[in-house]
Image: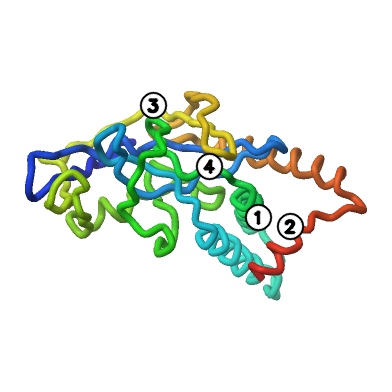
Amino acid sequence: MSWPVTMYYCTACDFEQGDWVTWGTREYVLNSGVRIPVHWHIGWCASCNGIVAVENLSMKIRMQDYRAAQRELSKFSRSMFGVSKHHKSMMGRLEDDSNNAIDALEMLMARKNPPHCLLCLSKQVHELNDPQLDDEAPDSPCIFNASNQHAGESKLKQKDNGQHWQHPECAGQIKTKLADGGLRIALRPSIQRFTAEGLLIDKEFVDGNSIPDSEYYDALSKSNWKYRAQSQVKEVGHPSLITSFLRARCS
């Protein structure tokens, strides 16, 4: 599977760059061993001198993730019919999304570092989007969540020149267009893993076609359930006040 390339260009200078530098699947590895998606948005990195993926540390986004998963799960609980195998699988993915959101909110409450550039890890980043206004994470080859494993092309690609930002290096505007000739790129799927503070741990190449295959996400779900079960055993009789607060806040 290949993906169309979006080009960023400046209206006042010769800046031009492809968006493939923002592609890839990224995860946070929490102290519990659980791995959750990295949310990000488009930003400018002074160290890279270009457009990059920047960590999105908005709690609002994670709360929206939690509420969305809970809304969908409530539809199954109200169903008058039996739950099919497909629906059970879907419910499992929604439960993963809900748990990922709770874990992410706990992580963000404890987070000390500001957002990093996800390419070079510099903190010298400038947000081109307001992260508090983002309704959701990009749904491109750039990021995954458990309920959207086979993501389509990003909204930015589909809009084709519908986005523009101030170029931090001059007075021009950065706009988008599809690459000349309909250029498409296929990437070898990889997973970049980061600490909860945004520091790179490792990069692993995995099976798939530009994005990790479904077996990867199935294995991730099972691994996360195992680590979460272990954490729950340790917390028996001592429920997490942070988790209780977050569940009440997001309900």
Question: Pointer 2 and pointer 3: residues touching (CB < 8 Å)?
Answer: no
Disc 1 marks a residue whose amino acid type is Ile
Disc 2 from disc 4: Cα separation: 21 Å
Please tell me the numbered disc located at residue 63: none
Please tell me the numbered disc located at residue 188: 3
Q: Which residue is mark 4?
A: 113
Disc 2 marks a residue whose amino acid type is Thr
Q: Residue at x 50, y 51 (%)?
A: 57
Question: Pointer 4 and pointer 1: residues touching (CB < 8 Å)?
Answer: no
Q: Which residue is mark 1?
A: 102
Question: Pointer 1 and pointer 2: residues touching (CB < 8 Å)?
Answer: yes
Disc 4 from disc 1: Cα separation: 19 Å
Disc 3 marks a residue whose amino acid type is Arg
State which tag comes first along the sequence, 2 or 4: 4
Q: Which residue is mark 2?
A: 243
Circle 3 or circle 4, nearest the eye: 4
Q: Residue at x 44, y 53 (%)?
A: 137
Q: Please identify the quadrant where the N terminus is shown.
A: top left
Regarding mark 3 in the picture, which secondary structure is present there?
loop
Marker count (numbered): 4
Q: Nearer the viewer, residue 49 or 249?
A: 49
Asked if residue 47 can be seen in this view, the reply is: yes
Q: Residue at x 49, y 31 (%)?
A: 191
Circle 4 or circle 1, nearest the eye: 4
State which tag comes first along the sequence, 1 or 2: 1
Q: Is residue 81 above or below residue 163?
A: below
